[in-house]
Amino acid sequence: MLYYVNGHWLPENQAVLPVTDRGFMYGDGVFETIAVVGGQLFRKHDHWQRLNRGLQQLAIEPPFSEQQFYALLFEGLQCNRLNHASLRLSVSRGVGPRGLSVGGCRDPSVVLLCFDRNDIPEQKLAYGTKLITVDIRRTPAECIAAGVKTANFINNIMAVSAARQTGADDALMLTTRGHIAECSMSNIFFVIDNTLLTPSLSSGIVAGVTRLAVIELAQQQGMTVTQAELDVNNMYAAEEMFCTNTGVFIMPVRQWDDIVFPMPARRCLKLRHALLDQLTRPDE
């Protein structure tokens, strides 16, 4: 694979940044992971908007326009002859003087990694994933990093590490107020009767692109969608539970803590099929 680093396409062993880049030193940057199916960038405008919001919140000058953003992504597909891929684009504040001050940081660093995308085996979808609630809390909404896909993922890293030590696949993180937030790298949904429930953005969760697509699809299917602060005990009554992100799209949850959900997850799979159908359409 060839990776893009600040204007150059390079093989992996040559794709490097200065050790003084603030993305490495402080996690001072943002990233996006974009799904590509059949050569189409899934909801590319949503990714651009979220990337731009993150850059604005961190006061990093966008290094490209929206059209240049799309052109770079398509260039990555062409360079690597990919039609079915995951693209991870990172923008850091770049190299600057030592210390936390952003003064003297003039040129953001841009890195694009391209990966062949592997479909999730059907048996994994049928079996589902196992989650456990961990003690590590989601960054609160009052903090600037909440909801922004920054390069600093230490909370999430430690959360999933704690979950794996118990034999679970992933961690469910709570807010500092004790409400449900999200998993280490995915948003979370619950089904009760004909209602789809998910934590609100005010909980400090990442505004997932797949999350938004699922909310729209659920509404089209006649489901009521509720975005709110979700109490753990109330959600134990859910009929189904599933995760969403760019990597898995929609993954049913087989077990959460001591709650075991029946498989297959009917609503989850119906939404997944609708999402996959949407993925094959041209993204205008």
Image: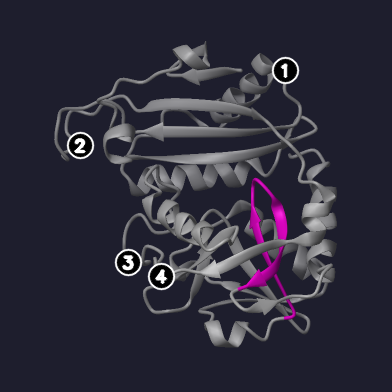
Circle 1/circle 3 CB separation < 8 Å: no
Of residues 87 and 74, the one nearer the viewer is 87
Q: Which residue is mark 2?
A: 102
* Identity, as a three-letter code, of the amino acid under mark 4: Asp
**Helix, strand or loop status at disc 4:** loop
**Helix, strand or loop status at disc 2:** loop
Residue drawn 53% across the image and 46% down it: 49
The furthest residue to the front: 166
Decide which of tag 3 and tag 2 comes sooner along the chain: 2
Which quadrant: the N terminus?
A: top right
**Helix, strand or loop status at disc 1:** loop
Residue drawn 39% across the image and 59% down it: 146
Residue drawn 27% across the image and 40% down it: 26
Crowdedness near tag 1: few (<14), some (14–19) or many (≥20) residues, C-alpha within 10 Å: few
Circle 2/circle 4 CB separation < 8 Å: no
The x and y percentages for residue 282 are: 80, 38
Q: Which residue is mark 3?
A: 142
* Identity, as a three-letter code, of the amino acid under mark 2: Val
Task: Read off the magenta span.
Answer: 239-256
Of residues 180 and 257, the one nearer the viewer is 257
**Left or right of 253 on screen, residue 5:** left
Q: Which residue is mark 1?
A: 81
Q: Nearer the viewer, mark 1 or mark 2?
A: 1
